[in-house]
Image (cartoon, rainbow, N blue to C red):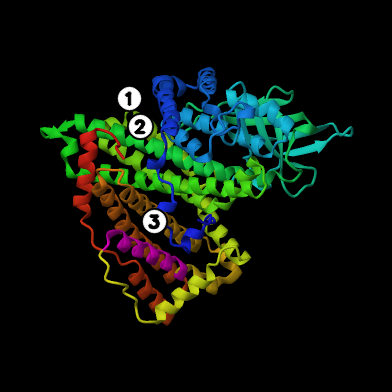
């Protein structure tokens, strides 16, 4: 099989046998995940209340314990005290860590953006000095990019680094804010501009150095147990050898590391969603009203089913994308690149899918947390319940690692950039769709095969996107980058299509492997998701076309929209009931 390119799902039909699904994990990988699960259950969960009171000593102690178990070095090469596992395995372990509320944020920041810049961009001396100790938990890492005047526009930061006359030290001055792990970190990855450079550079800074002042801990809406504060750098001497990567290469480092963070945030929120669903079902099975458990009420069943369907879809698309990253990485290695550079290139290749994962899964978690509170009712608003904490903690994920609005721009922007470069041939299939609109509708064969019918629906979703995007480019040309509302609509069409296809491919692969006795329930989830996605995609497409099209063009695309988003009727009420009945029986998220 030829390795798929990032964003290519839009123009290619994918075989179920060629994707990775969570059911493919082997026993060794599951044992590593169980170690993470046990650590969260035994060490973190009993201490979440204490963590929320701002206890940096406890937070650092837990990280150290995680390091001693090897959990901080899952994907770190063995030569730097890690386990050397692949990207997909690191994602599985992070899913279990994602259940750990504030600790999960601290853990993810340390193992991801706090460690990986040095692993992927550092020289051998920097890796030996810092990565080995970050992998074991002896050192804690933080990522210092955001400034008071530079958030989403990170490259506009004002922090400066000036090389002294002797050429031995950079003198660092500036302020960084919203720094996760800021109060407990030993190592800061600091982004600053050298002199009058246009682009940022990156530096490895030790928190013990003179001139570093920590601000007060931020009082946040959620994730209260994580350390977040401002850091002031006042004439800090940074040895010249602590420049990370090339001069002016910091912005590239920041962007590429964020691709990692986005996909890892996606799977961590899947873990958090599963935890909320399990807690909500346990409560619904115990809580009685009107003489029966509230789990027996249709309104509650609807909520639990929808929470589960979104979580299942998010899990499906994220692990699918994770394996794509790993396959691309191995292809780059085969071409002669070292593993670190190959991993960066693999992640860069799938920046579109990373952004989709981040958006879909973080928004699914917000929905799941909100409905969890509703299932708990008045108790859900009490700080005595875990769902109250989950609700507050979930909100930050739509802001972390680039806001979801920025990520929506990334999705369409990356696809258009690759199309204009000739890396992704979107134009040819878009023209083909245009011709199809003018011809007699192709109603296809009379197949009654379940999966073939679903595949045809997904293909039509892709045609809808190509139709709208092609017409939008024709209308606005190179100014389309400024049409943010339009780009966000196209992005939402892409997100729903990728999620629907990923769910379809997972269920089809399970069918081919005969790995589950509950295939009908998986089909129920697929049916409901695709049926709902069809109406969403039509709405997004209609809103886009109504903005820029007129006359016959508008009429033609409206007819095409209706044709391409037509799907078989689904008894969603009965399907959701069947899904929830199984969850109620198992008293947990069972898929």
Q: Residue at x 37, y 73 (%)?
A: 560
- Classify mark 2: helix, strand or loop: helix
In the image: residue 105, left or right of residue 525: right
> Can you tell which mark lies on residue 394?
none
Left or right: 32 as drawn, with respect to 251: left
Magenta-highlighted residues? 449-467
Picture disc at residue 388: 2
Indicate whether residue 461 is drawn in magenta: yes
How far apart marks 3 and 2 lie (CA) works out to 33 Å
Nearest to the eye among marks 1 and 3: give it: 3
Q: Which residue is mark 1?
A: 384
Label 3 element class: helix
Q: Separation of disc 1 and disc 2 at Cα? A: 8 Å
* On screen, residue 451 above or below 223: below
Locate the C terminus by quadrant.
Answer: top left
Asked whether disc 3 touches disc 2, contact meaning CB atoms under 8 Å apart, the reply is: no
Residue 455: name its quadrant. Answer: bottom left
When the figure is inspected, residue 193 is found, relative to residue 3, above or below; the finding is above
Do callouts 1 and 2 mark residues in contact (Cβ within 8 Å)? yes
Q: Where does residue 124 sit, x and y in percent of width and height? A: 72, 33
Magenta stretch, main secondary structure, is helix
Q: Which residue is mark 3?
A: 501
Q: In this view, which residue lies farthest toward the left?
A: 291
């Amino acid at each position: 099989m030829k390795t798929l390119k990032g964003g290519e799902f839009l123009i290619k039909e994918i075989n179920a046998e060629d994707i990775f699904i969570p059911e493919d994990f082997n026993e060794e990988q599951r044992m590593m995940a169980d170690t993470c699960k046990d650590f969260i259950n035994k060490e973190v969960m009993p201490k979440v209340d204490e963590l929320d009171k701002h206890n940096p000593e406890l937070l650092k102690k837990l990280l150290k314990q995680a390091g001693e178990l090897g959990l901080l070095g899952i994907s770190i090469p063995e030569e730097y005290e890690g386990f050397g596992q692949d990207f997909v395995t690191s994602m599985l372990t992070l899913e279990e860590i994602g259940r750990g509320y504030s600790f999960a944020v601290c853990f993810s920041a340390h193992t991801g953006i706090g460690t990986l810049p040095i692993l992927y961009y550092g020289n051998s001396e920097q890796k030996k000095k810092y990565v080995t100790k970050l992998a074991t938990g002896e050192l804690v890492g933080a990522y210092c990019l955001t400034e008071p005047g530079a958030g989403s526009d990170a490259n506009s930061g004002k922090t400066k680094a000036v090389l002294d006359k002797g050429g031995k030290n950079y003198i660092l001055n500036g302020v960084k804010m919203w720094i996760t792990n800021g109060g407990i970190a030993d190592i800061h990855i600091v982004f600053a501009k050298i002199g009058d450079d246009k682009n940022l550079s990156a530096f490895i800074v030790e928190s013990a150095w003179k001139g570093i002042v920590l601000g007060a801990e931020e009082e946040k809406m959620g994730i209260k147990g994580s350390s977040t504060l401002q850091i002031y750098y006042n004439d800090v001497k940074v040895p010249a050898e602590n420049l990370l990567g090339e001069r002016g290469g910091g912005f590239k480092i920041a962007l590429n590391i964020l691709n990692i963070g986005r996909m890892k945030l996606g799977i961590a929120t899947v873990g958090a969603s599963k935890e909320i669903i399990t807690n909500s079902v346990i409560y619904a099975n115990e809580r009685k009203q009107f003489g029966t458990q509230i789990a027996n009420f249709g309104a509650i069943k609807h909520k639990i089913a929808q929470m589960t369907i979104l979580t299942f879809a998010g899990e499906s698309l994220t692990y699918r994308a994770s394996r794509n990253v790993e396959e691309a990485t191995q292809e780059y290695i085969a071409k002669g690149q070292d593993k670190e550079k190959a991993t960066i290139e693999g992640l860069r290749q799938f920046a579109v899918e990373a952004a989709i994962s981040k958006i879909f899964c973080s928004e699914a978690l917000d929905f799941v947390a909100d409905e969890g509170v509703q299932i708990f009712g008045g108790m859900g608003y009490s700080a005595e319940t875990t769902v109250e904490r989950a609700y507050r903690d979930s909100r930050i994920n739509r802001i972390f690692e680039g806001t979801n609005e920025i990520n929506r721009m990334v999705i369409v922007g990356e696809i258009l950039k690759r199309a204009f470069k000739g890396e992704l041939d979107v134009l040819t299939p878009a023209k083909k769709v245009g011709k199809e609109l003018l011809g007699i509708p192709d109603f296809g064969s009379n197949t009654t095969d379940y999966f073939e019918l679903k595949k045809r629906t997904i293909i039509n979703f892709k045609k809808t996107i190509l139709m709208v995007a092609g017409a939008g480019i024709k209308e606005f040309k190179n100014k389309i980058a400024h049409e943010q509302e339009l780009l966000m609509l196209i992005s939402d069409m892409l997100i729903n299509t990728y999620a629907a296809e990923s769910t379809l491919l997972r269920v089809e692969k399970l069918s081919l492997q005969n790995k589950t006795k509950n295939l009908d329930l998986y089909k129920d989830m697929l049916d409901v998701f695709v049926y709902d996605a069809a109406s969403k995609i039509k709405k997004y497409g209609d809103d886009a076309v109504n903005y820029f099209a007129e006359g016959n063009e508008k009429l033609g695309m409206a007819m095409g929209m209706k044709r391409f988003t037509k799907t078989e009727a689904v008894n969603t009420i009965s399907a959701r009931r069947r899904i929830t009945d199984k969850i109620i029986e198992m008293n947990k998220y069972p898929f």
